[in-house]
Image (spheres, rainbow, N blue to C red):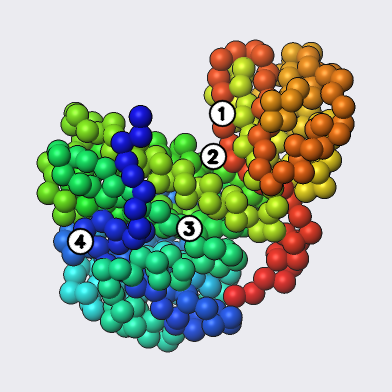
Amino acid sequence: MKNSATIDGGITAAKGFSAAGICAGIKKSGRPDMALVVSDSPAAVAAVFTTNKVQAAPVRLCRKHLSGRTGRAVIINSGNANACTGEQGATDALRMGELTAQLLGVEPSMVYVCSTGTIGVPMPMAKIEAGIHAAVAALAPDGGDRAAKSIMTTDTVDKQIALELTIDNKPVRIGGMAKGAGMIEPNMATMLSVLTTDAAVDGEALQACLANAVKQSFNCISVDGDQSTNDTVLFLANGAAGTDVLSATHPDWPAFCAAVDEVTRHLAISIVKDGEGATKFVTLTVSGAASEADARAVARAVANSLLVKTSWFGEDPNWGRIMDAVGYSGAEVNETLVDVAYDGILAVAKGQSAGMAEQELHSVLAKPQFRIDISLNLGSASHKLYTCDCSHEYVKINSEYTT
């Protein structure tokens, strides 16, 4: 049974948080491009970062600050990734945090820095510094919506959500925002996400809760198979709701973690639905695998196959491309046992055509959302992944995109 309710407010729905979103002039488009999220009091902090071995300067800085498990603010710019920018990039990320801290009157180690945008371009620090001043001045308890809109790059819509549940007989809120549309691959993506809660949470428990939520959400999506240099998810818990400190031994801990799962899953699915040029949202489930690693490998191979993704865009039920991807996934596979179904309509039975009329399968692919179920029939492990098609527009966006 669901124990939470959706409410308005995004990341500022939780008590004791304010936010801002402003235009610093980083983007050539003139759209908003800087956001700031601030907790009124020190908050426990958890984080998950990209596993890409090429990591942006802000990611390295955030990893360093996370050792303290506390924080007060997150400063974010879009339009420039500050990745592959050498020592100057590290200096610029540090300056972003230090200036924000100075203006807020907090220690620099309490400020986390995130950047997203084009890789390899020096940071326009004059604009960044002016933008930080403007963001601090614009902080407001209802600034969540503006912040969510200010972290977008190729996103066509903002991604945000807030939930309310009861902990210790008190209302507790969890808010979240995210950005991402391209360079999206399991093990995170070119995405940034900030979560907030007014519950009091033990730092180590918060980290475990977030890591598990990310495993089931942001690590279960793929738009194009490209993993980014900047992926960051930050979770701040400031205790403003007045609850006892939550940990795994608290009776309401399962409900809290379930709500966090719901927030991250909503944001992750929103990213896939807004995939660059996407016209189809596909829920891909692999079951009957010999191991969870095998189930993940098959799901990833199918979701990242350009031949499969373009067939979805063309509404062509070419299940042979799925079978091909299953075979090269590296997982244990017996071709004569594999079943594939489209929205419950069996297309492949025991590795061969199930004899279903092509028109019935075509009618499934003509829908904006559908599911594909692949059963390997070798074991009990399974994995669910959210993905999309690949259209002409994806090529257009990624051959012309400038900030």
Q: Are marks 2 and 4 in contact (CB under 8 Å)?
A: no
Categorize mark 2 by other alpha carbons within 10 Å: few (<14), some (14-19), many (20+).
Answer: many
User: Which of pointers 2 and 3 lies earlier in the amino acid sequence?
Assistant: 3
Percent x, y of residue 227: 58, 51
Categorize mark 4 by other alpha carbons within 10 Å: few (<14), some (14-19), many (20+).
Answer: many
Mark sitting on residue 35: none
User: Which of pointers 1 and 4 lies earlier in the amino acid sequence?
Assistant: 4
User: Mark 4 is on which residue type?
Assistant: Gly
Q: Residue at 69%, 30% (x, y): give it.
A: 343
Mark sitting on residue 383: 1
Q: On the image, numbered disc 2 is attached to which residue?
A: 220
Categorize mark 3 by other alpha carbons within 10 Å: few (<14), some (14-19), many (20+).
Answer: many
User: Mark 2 is on which residue type?
Assistant: Cys
Name the element at disc 4.
loop
Q: Is residue 96 above or below residue 185?
A: below
Q: Residue at 34%, 53% (x, y): give it.
A: 7
Q: Residue at 53%, 73% (x, y): give it.
A: 79
Q: Is residue 123 above or below residue 236?
A: below
Position of 240 with respect to 331 (left or right) is left
Percent x, y of residue 276: 66, 59
> Which quarter of the picture shows residue 285?
top right
Q: Is residue 375 visible?
A: yes
Q: On the image, numbered disc 4 is attached to which residue?
A: 16
Q: Nearer the viewer, residue 182 or 271?
A: 271
User: Mark 1 is on which residue type?
Assistant: His
| C-alpha span from label 2 to label 3 | 17 Å
